[in-house]
Image (cartoon, rainbow, N blue to C red):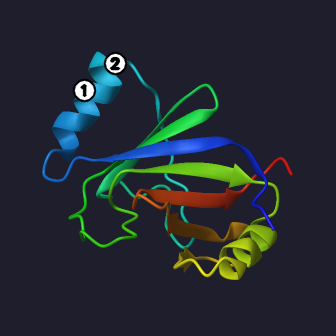
């Protein structure tokens, strides 16, 4: 069983302790537009979040200013997020392979993280177009 990746959704970098400098760099210097944060159970209008999202064309960059945990699966650390054809089938494939997984949300809103064989964190979300 394989996960059916449809396209890249976002990449993320950690800027702990430098959120406002990073916001000015990415939005001011690089001119990348900021977009509302969209996470399950979070108010997208909140202004004091320890992270912000940027988007150019169809790909987002998440700027995260949270302490990194140093764990094998660390959503606050650098990672790449992929959209998948069916998040339920992706979870089934991950479980069938016996991989450790972190998860938030449920149904089509579920977000999961796994590590690749080298320990890099990968995130998967339901493609809203599928």
Circle 2 sits in a helix, a strand or a loop, which is it? loop
In which quarter of the view is residue 109 placed?
Answer: bottom right
Does label 1 or label 2 sit earlier along the sequence? 1
Location of residue 4 in the rendering, given as x and y in whole percent from the top left corner: 79, 54
In the image shown, does 1 or 40 lie closer to the viewer?
Answer: 1
Residues at marks 1 and 2, CA–CA distance in whole angstroms: 6 Å
Q: Are marks 1 and 2 in contact (CB under 8 Å)?
A: yes
Q: Which mark is residue 129?
A: none
Residue at image x 67%, y 81%? Answer: 95
Identify residue for label 1: 25
Residue at image x 81%, y 68%? Answer: 1
In the image shown, does 126 or 113 lie closer to the viewer?
Answer: 113
In the image shown, does 42 or 59 lie closer to the viewer?
Answer: 59
In which quarter of the view is residue 123 placed?
Answer: bottom right
Residue at image x 42%, y 24%? Answer: 32
Residue 50 vertical placement versus 107 (above, below): above
| Crowdedness near tag 1: few (<14), some (14–19) or many (≥20) residues, C-alpha within 10 Å | few
| Crowdedness near tag 2: few (<14), some (14–19) or many (≥20) residues, C-alpha within 10 Å | few
Location of residue 91 in the rendering, given as x and y in whole percent from the top left corner: 70, 74
- Name the residue furthest front: 117
In the image shown, does 67 or 96 lie closer to the viewer?
Answer: 96
Q: Is residue 3 visible?
A: yes
Q: Is residue 35 left or right of residue 110?
A: left
Identify residue for label 2: 30
Q: Is residue 50 left or right of residue 17?
A: right
């Amino acid at each position: 069983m394989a996960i059916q990746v449809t396209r890249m959704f976002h990449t993320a970098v950690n800027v702990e302790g430098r959120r406002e400098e990073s916001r000015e760099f990415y939005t001011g210097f690089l001119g990348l537009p900021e977009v509302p944060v969209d996470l399950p159970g979070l108010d997208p209008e909140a202004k004091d979040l320890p992270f912000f999202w940027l988007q150019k064309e169809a790909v987002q960059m998440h700027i995260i200013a949270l302490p990194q945990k140093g764990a094998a699966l660390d959503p606050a650390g650098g990672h790449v997020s992929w959209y998948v054809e069916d998040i339920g089938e992706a979870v089934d494939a991950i479980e069938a392979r016996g991989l450790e997984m972190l998860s938030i949300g449920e149904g089509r809103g579920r977000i999961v993280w796994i590590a690749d064989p080298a320990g890099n964190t990968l995130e998967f979300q339901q493609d809203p177009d599928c």
